[in-house]
């Protein structure tokens, strides 16, 4: 009998603690109005390996075709490095659609360019985590 009462008290205490903690997070996330930067649409950048593209004319065609795509904000096609870099709104166009467009324009196979990622600072990762948490709990966005 004593154990069940003790478990009920612990469960009730844990429930109250969780509710207070979540309420505090909601208040913290909505305390200040989001900045203009936080309200802007999210933008992504992708790079593509164009090593299979043979002539410089195709590079120009790829650049023109990418700039016409809805959702693409900027693109740079460099024949010397055999690479194309594109910034875009992911809610309007996806990486796969960009890749498909480049392959159709170039008439050859193209792949994503993978850059080596090094381990970052744990403080920055923690800061980004809390920033994303705050943004997802904010009702003002």
Image: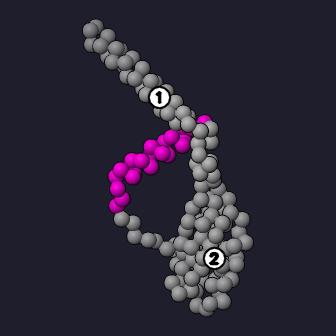
Q: Which mark is residue 24?
A: 1
- Quick one: quadrant of the N terminus? top left
Give the prevailing secondary structure in the magenta stretch. Answer: helix
Is 2 displayed left or right of 55 in the figure? left
Q: Position of residue 48 (x, y in %)?
A: 54, 75
Q: Element at badge 1? A: helix
In the picture of the structure, the residue carrying the numbered disc 2 is 102
> Would residue 106 be counted in the magenta stretch?
no
Report the number of discs: 2
Q: Position of residue 98 (x, y in %)?
A: 63, 70
Q: Is residue 131 above or below residue 94?
A: above
- Quick one: quadrant of the C terminus? top right
- Classify 10 Å Cα crowding around label 1: few (below 14), some (14-19), many (20 and above): few
Which residue is the extreme one toward the top? 1
Nearer to us in this view, 125 or 62: 125
Q: Which mark is residue 82?
A: none
Residue located at (44% from left, 24% from top): 20
> Would residue 136 be counted in the magenta stretch?
yes
Nearer to us in this view, 96 or 30: 30
**Magenta segment, which residues?**
119-139
Marked residue nearer the N-terminal end (1 or 2): 1
- Is residue 109 visible in the rendered image? The answer is no
Asked which quadrant contains residue 52, the reply is bottom right
Residue located at (49% from left, 33% from top): 28
């Amino acid at each position: 009998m004593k154990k069940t009462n003790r478990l009920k008290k612990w469960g009730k205490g844990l429930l109250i603690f969780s509710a207070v903690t979540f309420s505090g997070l909601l208040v913290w996330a909505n305390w200040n109005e989001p900045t203009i930067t936080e309200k802007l649409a999210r933008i992504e950048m992708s790079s593509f390996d164009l090593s299979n593209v043979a002539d410089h004319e195709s590079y120009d065609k790829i650049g023109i075709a990418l700039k016409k795509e809805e959702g693409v904000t900027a693109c740079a096609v460099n024949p010397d490095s055999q690479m194309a870099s594109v910034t875009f709104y992911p809610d309007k166009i996806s990486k796969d659609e960009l890749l498909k467009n480049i392959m159709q324009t170039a008439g050859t196979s193209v792949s994503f360019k993978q850059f080596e990622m090094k381990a970052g600072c744990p403080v920055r990762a923690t800061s980004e985590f809390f920033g994303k948490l705050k943004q997802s709990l904010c009702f003002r966005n």
